[in-house]
Image (tube, helix red, strand yellow):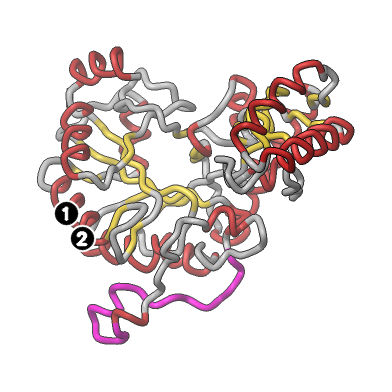
Amino acid sequence: MNPLIVLYYHRILPFKGYDIDISTFKWQLSYVSNRFDIVGVEELKSVLGGKRLERPSVLLTFDDGFADNFVYAYPILKKYNAKAVIFPATSKIRDNENVKDTLEDYWNGKVELKNLFIPDKRETALYDSLRGDYHEFLSWKELDIMKKSGIFEIGSHGHLHSKIFSDDNVHDFYHKDANVHWSFLYANNNNLNIGSPVFNMKSSLASKKFMPGDDFKRYTKDVFNEIYNKTQNYNKTKTKVLTEIKKYKNRGVFESDNDFKNRIFDELALSKRLIKEHLNTDTDLLSWPWGEYSKESIEVAKKAGFRYCFSTKKDFVGSKTDRCKIGRIHASDNIKRFKKRIFIYSHFTLSKIYNRFHI
């Protein structure tokens, strides 16, 4: 049997940095196209339905909906006549009708390379979007152009693409020296007070929401700041406060099962509706943010009309693949690692053995 591998990307950058740069992306497409057929969603659906592929195949996917996908990835894919799927988080997509110049415009002499959109040198786009700054993301008009080209098919990455507090276990406190996930801003209702408790977090589509009580948040903030003002040492303060709060049991409440399911349904339905309104596409494709899902969220996704849901679990696609847990392979910017992953997951037996010991 010939395998189908789904690769996933986020950003294509005009410089070497925190994700795939243009030259590496071109090399990857050349490498893949010489060894595989680069296919679209229909081939994926056929494989899930039991079809045997004539050649080893790859499906390319892009998460989040970054502007560089239009400016740089889109022209390169056109050059290779390669199809792809893009999963935008719909709350990030701009209404601006201005369309950015692309790499193709540069190739045709219409614009200088230096005048193309340049992403920020630091990866803060998702955090910035929580503050209303969407300049790093696509517009609906750009997505429409990508769709109408026949190169890109449109899926959903949900609406919010943020994490929530998923339990009452405090593992840190908000501070400049703490390693706090960017979506803490969303999970904590835009409150960034020093000493605020940091709970475990999961995707808003994967878990019931834990809502900390105001009394507990004030308590941890006061205790943290009192100790820190004496020690001026974040690590010592964190250790002492974690010990101190063990006696505090009533930390907040969880949303009910019905509220959890209704919240997920509302988010997925909103994303689906926005894609339909702006792109005239009734998509049945969903990429789970961070690859996180639950039994309940899968049930709700099906109810919302999503039949094919993609995860980040490393695996190939076959007829026995769960349609709501489709595995994908991250396209590493490290060439050796990229080759290794492609080789492993293009062999059924080898990939199963590898997964047994590495996942």
Residue behind mark 2: 23
Residue density around tag 1, few if under 14, some if 14–19, many if 20 or more, within 10 Å:
few
Span of residues in magenta:
94-112
Identify which residue, 11 or 240, lies in the foreground. Answer: 240
Contact (CB < 8 A) between labels 2 and 1? yes
The x and y percentages for residue 37 are: 18, 43
Identify which residue, 203 or 59, lies in the foreground. Answer: 203
Residue behind mark 1: 27
| Vertical position of residue 314 compared to residue 125: above or below | above
Q: Does residue 202 show up?
A: yes
Q: Secondary structure at mark 2?
A: helix
Q: Does residue 303 show up?
A: no
- Looking at the image, residue 91 sits to the left or right of residue 310; the answer is right
| Vertical position of residue 32 compared to residue 354: above or below | below
The x and y percentages for residue 172 are: 64, 32
Residue appearing at x 40%, y 71% in the figure? 118
> Callout 2, which amino acid?
Ser
Identify which residue, 193 or 146, lies in the foreground. Answer: 193
Chief secondary structure of the magenta span?
loop
Q: Which mark is residue 311?
A: none
- Looking at the image, residue 328 sits to the left or right of residue 232; the answer is left
The x and y percentages for residue 281 are: 53, 53
- Looking at the image, residue 136 sits to the left or right of residue 321; the answer is right
Residue density around tag 2, few if under 14, some if 14–19, many if 20 or more, within 10 Å:
few
Residue appearing at x 71%, y 39% in the figure? 228
Residue appearing at x 81%, y 23% in the figure? 256
Look at the image and say whether residue 58 sits in the magenta stretch.
no
Q: Secondary structure at mark 1?
A: helix
The x and y percentages for residue 341 are: 22, 32
> Callout 1, which amino acid?
Trp
The C terminus is located in which quarter? top left
